[in-house]
Image (cartoon, helix red, strand yellow):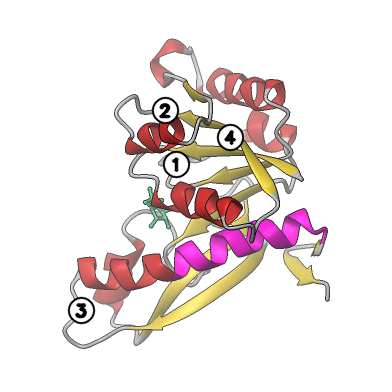
Amino acid sequence: MINIGVLASGRGSNFQSIIDSIKSGALNARVACLITDNPEAYAIERAKSHNIPHVYVNPADFTGKDMFYRRIADELKVCGVELVALAGFMRVVKKPLIEAFPMRIMNIHPALLPSFKGLHAQRQALEYGVKIAGCTVHFVDEGVDTGPIILQEAVPVLSNDSEDSLSERILTCEHRIYPLAIRLYAEGKLKVIGNTVKIEE
Ligand code: GRF
């Protein structure tokens, strides 16, 4: 069983999908802690109702980003975390955390990378006019949404879609592929080769 640390800044529905997957027995893991940069994050309520320890790390308490990420890395290590899952963590992760967990940090992004990196990916997809959108789970490197891709799932973009309706359709897929990617990692089936990830049978 692996120990996961989740970083979230808000609603935490992906965090919930990880919790649910563990509860259902589909994912043999334990969420060792939730770390948030937002004391108002609804993710905290989810942690409380599942007896998951949570830590609020206030970026304003640190002189620079490196110190902030060093503290987060320390908290994760204290909790015995082996894999870090970013679940709506609204910051670009910096070196001290990446170096503490090399190819052991995952992120879920609401677009088919490498298209539509960064914020408001679903809006970017609608504005561009693509007919297929989706989501991506990837390992985190020092770029913004650039690390090796683990899993993707596509959805159609419908002609009457709003940002909300498209986001909702994508979110359903996010909740499916994020726990699955974590499960593949936990089972030792992910092999990173350069910027690609091979999934072993
Ligand atoms: C999701 O759309 C995820 O892809 C993106 O941020 C959003 C977080 O949603 N990284 P939630 O907090 O998990 O509900």
Is the residue indicated by label 1 positioned so its CB lies within 8 Å of ligand 1? yes
Q: Residue at x 33, y 44 (%)?
A: 11
- Mark 4 vs mark 2: give the one in front: 2
- Label 3, secondary structure: give it: loop
Which badge, 1 or 3, is on the more N-terminal residue?
1
Residue that numbered label 1 is attached to = 89
Disc 1 marks which amino acid?
Answer: Phe
**Contact flag, marks 2 and 1 (Cβ < 8 Å):** yes
Residue 154 at what x, y percent from top left?
46, 80
Q: Residue at x 33, y 34 (%)?
A: 41
Residue that numbered label 3 is attached to = 161
**C-alpha distance separating marks 2 and 3:** 32 Å
The disc at residue 37 is 2
- Mark 1 vs mark 4: give the one in front: 1
Residue closer to the observer: 28 or 12: 28
The disc at residue 94 is 4
User: Which region of the structure is painted magenta?
Assistant: 173-188
Which badge, 4 or 2, is on the more N-terminal residue?
2
Residue 118 at what x, y percent from top left?
41, 55
Which badge, 3 or 4, is on the more N-terminal residue?
4
**C-alpha distance separating marks 4 and 2:** 14 Å
Which badge, 2 or 3, is on the more N-terminal residue?
2
**C-alpha distance separating marks 2 and 1:** 8 Å
Residue 130 at what x, y percent from top left?
34, 83
Residue 186: say if magenta: yes
Packing grade of label 1 (10 A; few <14, some 14-19, many >=20) is many
> In this picture, is 38 found above or below 131?
above
Disc 3 marks which amino acid?
Answer: Asp
